[in-house]
Amino acid sequence: MDNSQDLISQQIHLLGNMLGEVLIEQEGQPLFDRVEEVRALTKAMRLGDESAEASLQQIVESLSLSEAYGVVKAFASYFQLVNLAEEQARVRALRSRAQSGEPLNETITAAVTELSRRGLAADQLQALIDRLAIMPVITAHPTEAKRRTIMVKLGRLAAKLHEIDTVTLTPDEWADAIDLITEEIASLWQTEETRTRQPTVLDEVRNNLYYLEHTLFELAPRLHVELHRALAAIYPGDAFQVAPFVRIGSWVGGDRDGNPFVSIAVTEETLRTQKALALRLYRAAIDRMYGVLSSSERFGVSDGLRASLAADAMRFPAEAVRFEQRYPGQLYRQKMAFIYQKLLATEEGAARPWRADRLSRPTEYGSAGEFLDDLRLMQSSLAQHRGARMARGRLQRLITQVETFGFHLATLDIRQHSERHASAVAELLGRYGLVATYSDLSEHQRHDLLTAELYNPRPLTPARLDFSPETNETIELFRLIRRAHERLGPR
């Protein structure tokens, strides 16, 4: 057995032993013995023991409902733990290959290396980068029954397994890690694997936001960093401009084609939930930045940053006094405190249902662009005053995240069957006598008629809708899209 296989076998054995301890604690020795009996028989079947199948069938048929549930849950838990160990083995293998110094296949570095090998000049590569666009789209999966609670627990287990795999621990630290893993396994055992009710659309939204929060949000700036490093290493002396090339899309909460549960209210709640999460992630990032951007005023700051702080003090007079007392001579920290305050106010505003008219408070950010302006102002000031490393470090990563995710987090696809739109347009035009039968018009005639209406300053829909329920809903949906653009930006 090679070393890698030995390691994964050891980790699976360790996790299996922990699960066995938990099983005895939670359900007793008899269930543990029954699980072990089933496991031994299935192993014998794989090895060709012809009598094992009959014995296994006899045991399974004799199980009570509660015993059967316990056996199934035990094996389901075991395979979840095995999956974690196998994932850790894959990470271990990738790290080992990366340490060799050779670029891994199907990575950004490998791609740039291959382009250079083929003779691509820097200007040609820049043209290619300018066209680079990556947009994974999140969709709902009705067969995905795993609760977010379970995913969070498995995520913590994976992190702890990674720690014991990569860090040299003292005996006490090892014991602490084992205790934490066993605690998580016990908590998993006592947690229902699936919901006891049908998941709602908003449940699906929250499940998918888990991946945005814990994977994609951190991945986007890392891709940019990897590309910049590859370009610097493989095309030394050439300068490249790399615009944000990652965008995230989602259908969840917006795809109403054939889904009666995706209502106007659900779509608005989805958009507001995404915005609230984006703002919360940005607040957490600013919180972490306090420890980084602690530069003293004696190193200098730009006039623009000073003017910005003065403007912030006008908007937050009470907070300005507190921030200056808490961070004397630390203007970047004072600026971040104002940024945090504005993000918090914007997040509180995101929790309120959207009105037809937008009432943006002066303490809130009106757009992600305003947030970006504040971050770039700090970045520019740092770059001008011996802070280039801080300017292009974690601050730049945060800027990349804001450029990528904005306040919308993911572009929500609003999907509806075209017949609903055609029916609504026909009812609108028919109500005002603009056309007798819209459905009889040719494609060219429809195009000309609708284009003329778009250029007509007269509104086609009244403030109070009195059409059929389907048409009213279609019009309200487009009004919601307009409000979303006003509050989240064009993406």
Image: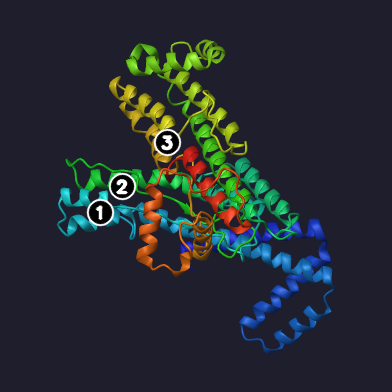
Label 1 residue SS = helix
Earlier in the chain: of badge 1 and badge 3, it is 1
Earlier in the chain: of badge 2 and badge 1, it is 1
Task: Report the residue at 38% width, 14% height from top.
Answer: 306
Task: Report the residue at 40% width, 62% height from top.
Answer: 446
Q: Is 217 placed left or right of 472 in the picture?
A: left
Frontmost of labels 1 and 3 is 3
Instruction: Provide the residue designation for mark 1.
Output: 112
Classed neighbour count for the residue bearing mark 3: other residues with Cα under 10 Å, few (<14), some (14–19), many (≥20): many
Determine which quarter of the picture holds residue 376. Answer: top left
Task: Report the residue at 27% width, 47% height from top.
Answer: 230
Q: Position of residue 177 (x, y in %)?
A: 62, 46
Classed neighbour count for the residue bearing mark 2: other residues with Cα under 10 Å, few (<14), some (14–19), many (≥20): some
Instruction: Provide the residue designation for mark 2.
Output: 227
Q: How many marks?
A: 3
Q: How is the image coloured?
A: rainbow
| Amino acid, disc 1 | Val
For residue 47, above or below residue 293: below
Instruction: Provide the residue designation for mark 3.
Output: 398
| Amino acid, disc 2 | Leu
For residue 246, above or below residue 336: below
Determine which quarter of the picture holds residue 45. Answer: bottom right
Q: Do the CB atoms of the residues marked 1 and 3 lie less than 8 Å apart?
A: no
